[in-house]
Image (tube, rainbow, N blue to C red):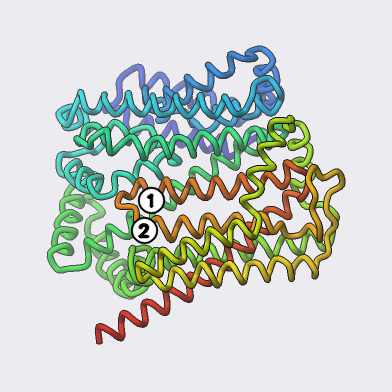
């Protein structure tokens, strides 16, 4: 007996009954089938097949045709709005799992998914361009898209369209409809495509690699990925909703509009009998609570608003906290046991992927994590920043480099972890944490400092994300060359990121205080 699924069947049945007047025979038939199916499964009369075994059989049966299956899923996700009814992350993870089983290769899979996702978004974008606003105005009211809301959406997309494309790629419903809405809102394709290529690439790489790395635990990975995507979507919706509500209630005119809208809703036949009770709750419960929360809400909004001690400050504090936590946890683990979680799996994968050409390439890339190289690059950028009178950024780079170098070698001497056996390049000293991985974070710090000089937001994102990817590759070459464990590399990244973030926190506070003194 599965009470949760029995409850789900009852909920679907109640929904079907409540909306039966608005639905046709086909929809009611599908809902009835859903009720029966959920009830049968909830009663324990049938059991679902083992997903892991099914994926294994599917991989063996499809072989190279898996590329076609996953590409079709990525394309239909937005090109045919399949993402509204089916989670696109699952099929991407399935492709990664099959690649992990050795039936196909991960690199071509990521490229094919990437191209297919961009193609699907492009088709959806131009469908929106072709059908236009009239289509949304004609059919939008069925899903509560009125002309007023469409105008508000268009204004928002005009200001934050790029962010919507980038973040929305990881939120199911937004991913499925955003390209169509953006096309119908007359956004230029030239502005749309850079964000879309970047978002699709991150999405394709993340979920296929997730399945590839953890292919032996597909069922758990799919569950966690779905929960993570749902959690991300929930956080985005709640955050945006709170910000919009706070802005709406900020002045007298906005509060009057909100009151008028509430009064209109209370006049609906369904809510009219409860109107007196709802008005009393609003006046004696909601309004006092909202008044008390106004200060904290505005404080939170200021922390996610660009400029001053806003979004930038919140971001670096978050990086500091996460980096310090990861580094501390890894340090505790490696001092208590020989290998941390993922060390053995990463070493085995590196051994499987090793080729003469790959080893030669890794030896070249890993050189970008040496101290002389990053020190020279830092000096060049510092000189550029000083000529532009951006002293705070220059000091963050210099102090961060010195502190991270000292911290890495001090930690090595305290932990004294031996290196893996069979290294493919010469390496001296202790293994934990990886100095190369810590030095790789310097490239991210340099990119952040230089990105402010890029005039376009998309260009800044490309520069910073490119630096993050490059830093990841530099660090992973140490695992590929069997010089470090994966936990060594992760600790190096985390420690250096936390140190640079701490320097940035100090710099932002100092700059903020100086600017306030000048104003006064």
Which quadrant: the N terminus?
A: top right
Q: Nearer the viewer, residue 39 or 255?
A: 255
Q: Is residue 181 visible?
A: no
Horizontal and vertical percent position of residue 54: 67, 21
Residue marked by disc 2: 452
Horizontal and vertical percent position of residue 173: 39, 37
Is 509 displayed left or right of 288 in the figure? right
**How many numbered badges does the structure rendering display?**
2
Horizontal and vertical percent position of residue 264: 16, 51
Horizontal and vertical percent position of residue 427: 79, 53
Helix, strand or loop at label 2? It is loop
User: Marks 2/1: CA distance?
Assistant: 7 Å
Q: Nearer the viewer, residue 319 or 496?
A: 496
Residue marked by disc 1: 460
266 over 19 or under it: above or below:
below
446 over 191 or under it: above or below:
below
Quarter where residue 416 is shown = bottom right
Helix, strand or loop at label 1? It is helix
Q: Are marks 2 and 1 in contact (CB under 8 Å)?
A: yes
Tell me which label, 2 or 1, sits earlier in the chain. 2
160 over 415 or under it: above or below:
above
Which quadrant: the C terminus?
A: bottom left
Q: Residues within 10 Å of mark 2 (few under 14, many from 20)?
A: few
- Residue lying at 31% horizontally and 26% vertically, measured from the top left: 124
Q: Nearer the viewer, residue 246 or 454?
A: 454
């Amino acid at each position: 007996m599965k009470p949760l699924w029995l409850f789900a069947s009852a909920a679907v049945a109640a929904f079907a009954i409540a909306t039966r007047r608005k639905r046709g025979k086909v929809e009611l038939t599908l809902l009835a089938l859903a009720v029966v199916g959920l009830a049968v499964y909830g009663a324990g009369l049938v059991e679902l097949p083992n997903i892991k075994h099914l994926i294994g059989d599917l991989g063996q049966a499809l072989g190279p045709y898996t590329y076609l299956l996953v590409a079709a899923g990525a394309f239909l996700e937005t090109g045919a709005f399949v993402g509204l009814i089916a989670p696109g992350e699952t099929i991407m993870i399935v492709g990664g799992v099959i690649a992990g089983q050795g039936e196909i290769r991960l690199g071509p899979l990521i490229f094919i998914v990437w191209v297919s996702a961009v193609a699907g978004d492009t088709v959806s974008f131009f469908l929106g361009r072709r059908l236009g606003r009239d289509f949304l105005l004609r059919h939008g009211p069925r899903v509560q898209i009125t002309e007023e809301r469409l105008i508000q959406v268009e204004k928002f997309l005009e200001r934050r369209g790029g962010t919507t494309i980038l973040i929305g790629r990881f939120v199911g419903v937004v991913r499925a409809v955003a390209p169509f809405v953006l096309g119908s809102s007359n956004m230029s394709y030239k502005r749309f495509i850079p964000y879309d290529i970047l978002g699709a690439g991150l999405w394709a790489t993340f979920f296929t690699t997730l399945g590839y790395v953890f292919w032996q635990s597909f069922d758990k990975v799919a569950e966690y990925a779905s929960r993570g995507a749902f959690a991300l979507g929930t956080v985005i919706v709640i955050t945006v909703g709170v910000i919009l509500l706070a802005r709406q209630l900020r002045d007298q005119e906005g509060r009057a509009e909100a009151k008028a809208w509430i009064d209109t809703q209370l006049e609906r036949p369904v809510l009219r009998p409860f109107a007196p009770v709802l008005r009393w709750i609003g006046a004696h419960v909601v309004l006092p609570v909202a008044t008390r929360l106004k200060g904290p809400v505005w404080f939170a909004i200021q922390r996610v608003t660009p400029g001053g001690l806003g979004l930038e400050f919140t971001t670096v504090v978050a990086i500091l906290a996460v980096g310090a936590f990861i580094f501390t946890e890894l340090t505790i683990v490696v001092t208590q046991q020989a290998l941390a979680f993922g060390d053995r799996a990463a070493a085995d994968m590196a051994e499987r992927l090793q080729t003469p050409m790959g080893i030669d390439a890794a030896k070249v890339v890993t050189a970008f994590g040496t101290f002389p190289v990053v020190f020279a690059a830092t000096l060049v950028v510092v000189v550029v920043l000083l000529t532009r009178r951006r002293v705070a950024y220059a000091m963050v780079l210099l102090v961060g480099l010195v502190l991270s170098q000292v911290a890495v070698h001090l930690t090595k001497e305290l932990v004294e972890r031996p290196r893996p056996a069979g290294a493919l390049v010469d390496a001296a000293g202790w293994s934990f944490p990886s100095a190369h991985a810590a030095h790789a974070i310097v490239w991210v710090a340099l990119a952040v400092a230089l990105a402010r000089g890029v005039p376009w937001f998309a260009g800044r994102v490309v520069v910073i994300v490119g630096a993050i990817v490059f830093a990841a590759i530099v660090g992973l070459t140490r695992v590929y060359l069997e010089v470090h464990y994966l936990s060594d590399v992760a600790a190096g990244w985390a420690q250096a990121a936390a140190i640079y973030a701490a320097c940035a926190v100090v710099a932002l506070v100092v700059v903020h205080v100086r600017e306030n003194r000048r104003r006064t």
